[in-house]
Image (cartoon, helix red, strand yellow):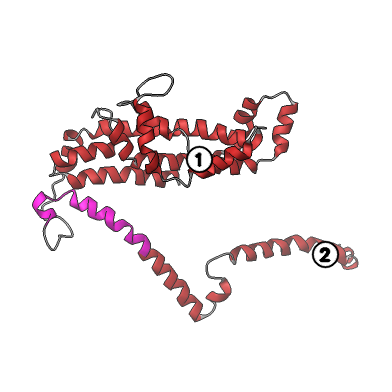
Amino acid sequence: MALLLKDSPDLVLKSGRPKRRRKAAVTEASERTLVSPLTLQHPGGRLLYWLVFVLLLVSTLSTLGPLYWVFSGALKPTLELFETPPTFWPMHPIWSNYIQAWNVLQLPLYFMNTLILAGGAVFLQLLVSATAAYALSKLRVAGKGIIQFAFFSTLMVPPIVYLVPQFVNISELPLINVSLFNSWSGVWLPEAASAFNILLLKSFFDGIPAELTDAALLDGANAWQMFMQIILPLSRPVLAVVTIFTVIASWKDFLWPLLVLADSNLQPLTVALYHLSGVNSNLPFIIWLLDLLLPVFRQFSCS
């Protein structure tokens, strides 16, 4: 065996190549950091590393400051909220503020309304934007370039400009003469399509190989089957991004639901807090706390 290896140096070289390649891959992966291992061998490099680490740690902890201030403020009485200098922790925490705000302000109702509005916006957004992006990307649509240019043009118009025309259309829909005022449909309809999301989805659909759709077309699949069985399963990452954008936009939307929803039982949390802030002025911080924490936790869970 030793003689065979001695007489066959090529065999030794070939057997050693995978090990060298794995070692080179590990070394290359270890060097893909903010501070390279070679820099860390010097005192100045290690000092730079720990300075960056401390800076990032302080920046991360500073983002928790507003959350703590809202949490501690929710436990204070009204007089202590306006003391100067402010207290870091309430002298007499009132834990019942949470229960009082939850029951008196009907927060479960407004939370549910907000979730329903966000869920409907996500459903319509994915339905309309995904199908429009699929048509522009994979189907032969007449005037595709003109349509895409029109989408780009709408991105240059401020959203506030659409406010009056949208309100007129919601008050009485053209052709069918139906009013969507004071209904969730009036909030969902303007959120059903977004030029930015359509262009985002189209750019992702363009990266899907055309060979997949061509093979499905040869197998007898129609356009809807290709969309449901090929395009959507491969587009889960971008669909998740669109969902996050839509939920955040729907959650923080205030002006449009304020104009459309006059019934307090249909209003989302942002509009309800605006109307209730004057009636229950003793509980401002606890309301802001509950309005703030849910989207923050949801964003962390999605990431």
Magenta span includes 69 = yes
Tally the numbered discs: 2
Return the residue nearer the eye: 275 or 299: 275
> Which quadrant, please, contains the N terminus?
bottom right
The single residue placed furthest to the left in the displayed view is 79
Q: Is residue 49 left or right of residue 101?
A: right
Q: Which is nearer the eye, 92 or 101?
A: 101
Residue 134 seen anywhere in this rendered image of the structure: yes
Q: Position of residue 140 (x, y in %)?
A: 67, 32
Left or right position of 216 against 15 = left
In the picture, residue 231 is in which quadrant?
A: top right
Local packing at callout 1 (Cα closer than 10 Å; few below 14, some 14-19, many 20+) is some
Q: Which mark is residue 80?
A: none
> Could you tell me which residue is drawn at 61 percent across and 62 percent down?
29
Circles 2, 1 touching at the beta carbon (< 8 Å) = no
Q: Tell me which residue sits at (42%, 18%) in the image.
A: 176
Specify whether residue 51 is painted magenta: no
Residue beneath disc 1: 195
* Above or below 156: residue 187: above
- From the top left corner, tell me how far across and down residue 259 is, in percent: 29, 34
Position of 23 compared to 178: left or right? right
Residue type at the position of mark 1:
Ala
Q: Secondary structure at mark 2?
A: helix
Would you name the residue on which mark 2 appears?
Answer: 12
Describe the element under mark 1 as helix, strand or loop: helix
Q: Earlier in the sequence, mark 2 or mark 1?
A: 2
Q: Residue at x 35, y 47 (%)?
A: 296
Residue sitting nearer the eye, 8 or 235: 235
Q: Which residues are magenta?
A: 59-82
Task: For label 2, count other residues whose C-alpha is less than 10 Å away and answer few (under 14), some (14-19) or many (20+).
Answer: few
Answer whether residue 238 is visible to the viewer in this image.
Answer: no
In the rendered image, the residue lying farthest to the right is 7
